[in-house]
Image (cartoon, grey):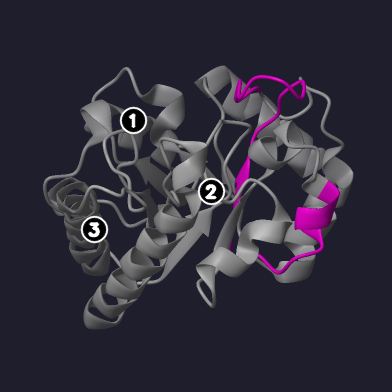
């Protein structure tokens, strides 16, 4: 089984995206942003599909040194946990960032406080959550495997495209991941190309996914790219 992210149809309504993706996959990841922001689980309840949710990340920062923003970010994500619990969905979250290089140590402490808070909420709602590795963006946490210690026992979500940007995909593939995002790029921009359109060697990726027995999520930017990626995975699995 493979999942498909609603990111490929982010310019359409959530219902339209769910209807279209339902015709090609039994597993859907909702990109909980923009037109697909979830105020409740109601839009998902009429679909007999497996779901995961990518929690809001554009306006949140669980590592913020500004305590009201850190707390609000945790509150937003805990609300996502509550919705996820109603449809038995796992949740993917970003690890946050620091605004100035000199603030990194303090931001690490804030991240750990937030993860403790989120772990409490995950137990309260019986929801699984995963921390996603980041692309080559200044001041974001978890760009390389060396930073996995920052998230402790929290499972991580391996974003293959992000790891490729940071030239450490092989090292990440050697780590046990709890979730996978599949998309391609040319090693520079986070372009979310269809699998096979960039410079990533996806054969080791597919082998790692199969070894861990986890259904990966195709997270490319267009529906055409999703279909091309499905053909690639089917041919090489």
Q: Is residue 199 visible?
A: yes
How far apart are the alpha carbons under marks 1 and 3?
27 Å
Residue 213's x, y, as percent?
Answer: 69, 68
Q: Residue at x 79, y 46 (%)?
A: 169
Q: Classify mark 2: residues with Cα within 10 Å, few (<14), some (14-19) or many (20+).
A: many
Residue 149 to residue 13: above or below: below
Circle 2 is placed at which residue position?
Answer: 141
In the image: residue 135, left or right of residue 107: right
Circle 3 is placed at which residue position?
Answer: 74
Q: Residue at x 20, y 54 (%)?
A: 67
Residue 188 to residue 154: above or below: above
Residue 201's x, y, as percent?
Answer: 87, 37
**Circle nearer the viewer, 2 or 1:** 2
Q: Earlier in the sequence, mark 1 or mark 3?
A: 1
Q: Is residue 52 magenta?
A: no
In the image: residue 83, left or right of residue 156: left
**Circle nearer the viewer, 1 or 3:** 3
**Circle nearer the viewer, 3 or 2:** 2
**What span is colored magenta in the figure?**
170-193
Q: Earlier in the sequence, mark 3 or mark 2?
A: 3
Q: Secondary structure at mark 2?
A: loop
In the image: residue 89, left or right of residue 86: right
Q: Residue at x 57, y 31 (%)?
A: 137
Circle 1 is placed at which residue position?
Answer: 17
Number of numbered callouts drawn? 3
Q: Secondary structure at mark 1?
A: helix
Mostly what secondary structure, the magenta segment? loop
Residue 81's x, y, as percent?
Answer: 25, 63
Q: Is residue 185 magenta?
A: yes
Q: Tell me whether circle 2 and circle 1 mark residues in contact (CB < 8 Å).
A: no
């Amino acid at each position: 089984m493979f999942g498909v992210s609603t990111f490929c149809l982010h310019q359409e309504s959530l219902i339209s995206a769910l209807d279209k993706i339902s015709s090609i996959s039994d597993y859907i990841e909702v990109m909980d942003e923009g037109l697909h922001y979830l105020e409740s689980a109601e839009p998902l309840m009429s679909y007999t599909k497996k779901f995961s949710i990518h929690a809001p990340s554009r306006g949140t920062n669980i590592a913020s040194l500004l305590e009201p923003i850190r707390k609000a970010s945790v509150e937003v994500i805990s609300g996502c946990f509550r919705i996820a619990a109603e449809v038995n969905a796992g949740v993917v979250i970003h690890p946050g960032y620091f605004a100035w290089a000199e603030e990194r140590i303090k931001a690490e402490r804030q991240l750990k406080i937030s993860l403790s808070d989120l772990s409490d909420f995950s137990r309260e709602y019986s929801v699984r959550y995963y921390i996603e590795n980041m692309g080559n963006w200044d001041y974001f946490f978890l760009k390389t495997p060396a930073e996995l210690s920052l998230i402790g026992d929290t499972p991580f979500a391996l974003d293959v495209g992000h790891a490729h940007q940071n030239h450490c995909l092989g090292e990440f593939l050697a780590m046990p991941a709890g979730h996978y995002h599949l998309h391609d790029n040319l090693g520079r921009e986070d372009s979310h190309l269809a699998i096979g359109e960039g410079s990533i060697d996806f054969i080791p990726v597919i082998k790692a996914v199969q070894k861990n027995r986890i259904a990966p999520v195709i997270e490319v930017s267009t529906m055409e790219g999703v279909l091309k990626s499905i053909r690639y995975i089917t041919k090489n699995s």
